[in-house]
Each structure stands twice: as C-alpha cells, then as structure tokens.
Image (cartoon, rainbow, N blue to C red):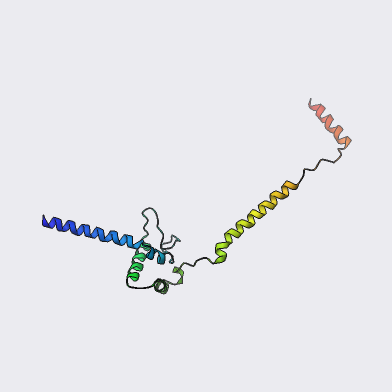
Amino acid sequence: MPKFKTSLLVVLMTVAALAQTATELESPAVNRVAAKLNCSCGCKLNMACRMPPDGRCPVCQMNKTKILAMQQAGSSDQQILDQYAAENGKDILVIPPGSAGVIGPYVALGLGLIAVFFTIRRYMRLKPSLASTQIDRATLEQIEKDMAKLD
C-alpha cells in the first residue's frame, strides 16, 4: 500500500508540474515575445498562435519553452529576439506594418466609396433622351406590308 501511495503522489506531482508549465507557456510575457517571431512550421502565423484542433503547434510549443527558459534566466525581450535572429536569420522576426501598411486599406476603401458615390451621382443626373428621329415613310409602309402578310 505505501508503494501505491508513493506512485500516486509522484503521478499527481508530475501532472501538476506539467499543468503549471502549460500555463506559463501561455503567459502574457512569453506570448509578448512569441508574437514577434514567425513560426517556421509553414502556418504563416507568429509563434503566439493557437493552431486548431488542440491549440498546440509543436514548433511554437518548443520555442515558447525556450523563450520561458530564457526569461527565467533573466534575458530581456530584445536579447531573446536578438538571439533568435542570430540563430535563425532575420526572417524569423515579424516585421510590423508601417503607417502606410496600416492606413493603406482605409485609404483604398475611402477612394472606392468616393468612386461609387460619383458614379451613382452621374447616373442619377442622366435623363432619358426622347426618340427624336423621324421614321422614313417608305420603311414604315414596308413594315406594315410585312405585318399584313403575317395575318
């Protein structure tokens, strides 16, 4: 019986330690750094992502574990990013959009709305033109003859 209690205690402590690590890996401090790094698994997201179905990307999990260990060792966010850039190249760093990247879609939307407004306004101003052309008498007589043949 004592061996069973000891084994149960070891299992419970292991589960508690793993659960604590999982919550630490999703802490704001780790995700703050992970959001500045591109994931190399091919998902085209940053390492703070939560991929379906279970919300765990093995590449992100491994890197978050490394980030957590570096943070616990006392490294600053910039030191961690510099080390990742040195190990994996500058492509691993997320490049945030500049002001044109943020404002660009809104400018395009505004220009599109202006174009739609002026197009609608132009078509609202057009008045239907009356048919002012004279019908040739010979053509009119030919049409009436052809219509009489149909009866």
**Residue at figure coordinates x 16%, y 58% from the top left:** 7
- Residue 105 appears in which quarter of the rendering? bottom right
Q: Position of residue 132 (x, y in %)?
A: 84, 41
Q: Position of residue 134 (x, y in %)?
A: 87, 39
**In this picture, is 84 found above or below 124?**
below
Q: Position of residue 4 (x, y in %)?
A: 14, 55
Q: Residue furthest right?
A: 137
**Residue at figure coordinates x 11%, y 57% from the top left:** 2
- Drawn side of residue 144 relative to residue 81, left or right: right
Point out the image quarter for the C terminus.
top right
**In this picture, is 1 found above or below 82?**
above
- The residue nearer to you, when weighing 43 against 72, is 72
- Drawn side of residue 102 relative to residue 130, left or right: left
Point out the image quarter for the N terminus.
bottom left
Count of residue discs: 0
- Residue 11 appears in which quarter of the rendering? bottom left
Q: Residue furthest left?
A: 1
**In this picture, is 147 found above or below 77?**
above
Q: Position of residue 55 (x, y in %)?
A: 37, 56
- Drawn side of residue 94 relative to residue 125, left or right: left
Q: Residue furthest top?
A: 151
**Residue at figure coordinates x 33%, y 62% from the top left:** 24
- Drawn side of residue 134 relative to residue 57, left or right: right
